Amino acid sequence: MIMMKTNYYKLLFITGVMATLIYSCKSELETVPIEQQTIDYLFNPQDSAGVNANKFLYDIYTHLPLLGNRVGDDYLDAATDDAISSNTTNTSIQQLATGSYSSSNYPDNQWGSYYAGIRQTNIFITNIDAVPLKGSLANGTSFNRVWKAEAKFLRALFYFELLKRYGGIPLLGDKVYQLNDDISLPRNTFEECVNYITNECAAIKDSLRIAPVANNAIERPSNGAALALKSRVLLYAASQLYNGKNVDASNPLTGYAAYDAQRWKKAADAAKDVINLGVYGLLSNFKDVFLVQVNSERIFIRQGGNNTRVENNNGPVGYTTSANNGRTSPTQELVDAFGMANGLPITAPLSGYDATKPYLLRDPRFYATILYNGAPWLSRPVQTYQGGLDKPGGVKQQTRTSYYARKFMGNFETKTTYDNQNHDNILFRYAEILLNFAEASNEYLDSPNQEVYSVVESIRRRAGLVPAELTPGLSKDSMRVIIHNERRKELAFEEHRFYDVRRWKEAEITFNKQIHGNLIYLEASGKLTYQNDPVQKLVFTPKMYFAPIPYSEVVKNKNMVQNPGW
């Protein structure tokens, strides 16, 4: 069940308050003993500034998704065909990649964390009106209304994070359950969950800050964030896994019983609503999206601070001037997906690809995403040939594919050591919205229209492909292949592929195969030779389309139905 009918509720509330105390450092809350911190104290009718309530709201933000090396110190993408962990022990991410987990030990189990966040939002939503907040936004929206809408946005996002993992989950509404309540709740259907989340987004969008938000509120959700969440939810809901073509089409917990093309139309319209705001745009420099904190492509983020954590976790291991753990090894499959700077795949006869010089004239996003043998880094070329400085062999953790992940890192090509960089968790950005629109429109239409072409070409043009234009007259199937590959390249390591391949209902093939690296040898003559190298066998069975409901929840709740196969 959602939460034990014990003192867990009381502990959860106290834990939230204690986290608020830690977050707020030396605040007036510290002068009140923990056992005296009641709802009336946190939502004080005399506190017109809402000091305590605001701190409680800030604490809810700690449940927002994290990206980066978060699954046992690995990228989630290392459980796909895009990367593997450089750690050769039985890591959590390897368990995800090979299906060696059960309902008792799912490596990315977020059930408890997101339901804790949902309960905190419900406490906030049901109590904030007791606080007579002064002030309003420039458009006249009162802060009571804004803060309540923020909490509802966070709750909707938490529900979606659960939905994409587990399928239909119990919806709590605004109710804050107490110790004596019956909380053996059944799961809502997939459709009910989709409707709840999207209706919430529609209801709150006009109560949130207007995008773009002020620089001092970059972590607060805007109307654009609400519309972006709605876009993503409806794209998932229209996709093959859920839209009448799922693992068990008769199971309302994991999708719709019948296919409906109108779901693609709704997804396209939702993405278009974000586009029509007219406040977001693609940056000219792809790398700046991840390094410049305030920019036109970011829609919603969780702040990550200025640090060198990405570089330290994933940088090539042979440099002595900076700490590098080389944790992520991109695959040859991902490298090959990037194609050439002229926009053609490496297999196309006129692409110009040279297997003896495989990293020459590639899609510019390749150079912003992958560190390859010969790539400039910290004032010398990366050496990932056998015995090179960054692939020395032996027991030291190092690349297993001859590649390191470069994405999200600062511009350290000509520096000698790392310095702090902005490493926010970008949860929604404009390029995804454009790709959402292109995919949904292509699936709804009989063949791609000019609007689909224009949106896909805008992504390719920003990437630096010349020409960026696509071949006229493409079929729906041909355009689908292009859009899927553009998502793979553009959104690499942003935790999309793990779920994209599932929602496309392609995981039984794509995630059920041998993946490869590249063995590189430096001959005495100075010539480099390349050899395809099998590095890991991905395993995927139909039950893995959905994560297992935690065994502890099924045992405690007689109404909790487990996902198929678990």
Image: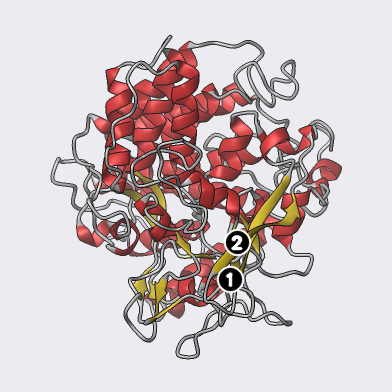
Name which quarter of the figure residue 462 lies in: top left
Is residue 69 placed above or below 150 in the rendered structure? below
Mark identifier at residue 530 = 2
Asked whether 317 or 248 is in front, the reply is: 317
Q: Is residue 437 left or right of residue 329?
A: left
Q: Which label sits on residue 521?
A: none
Kind of residue sitting beneath label 1: Glu
Q: Which residue is drawn at 62% across and 68% down?
A: 73
| Quadrant of the image containing the N terminus | top right
Q: Which of marks 1 and 2 is in front?
A: 2
Residue extending furthest toward the front: 525
On the rendered structure, is 195 left or right of 71? left
Q: Distance between the residues labelled 1 and 2?
A: 66 Å
Q: Which residue bears the numbered disc 1?
A: 35
Most distant residue in the left direction: 138
Q: Crowdedness of circle 2 by 10 Å Cα count: few (<14), some, many (20+)?
A: some
- Residue 475: in sight, yes or no? yes
Q: Using residue 488 as the reference point, say whether residue 362 is left or right of it.
A: left
Q: For mark 1, does the 10 Å Cα neighbourhood hold few (<14), some (14 to 19), or many (20 or more) residues?
A: few
Kindly state the secondary structure of the residue where label 2 is placed.
Answer: strand
Identify the image's colour scheme: rainbow, by chain, secondary structure or one colour: secondary structure
Q: Tell me residue 219's x, y (percent).
A: 34, 56
Q: Where is residue 441 in the image (x, y as percent from the top left)?
A: 39, 20
Q: How many labels does the image show?
A: 2
- Tell me, yes or no, if residue 122 can be seen here: no
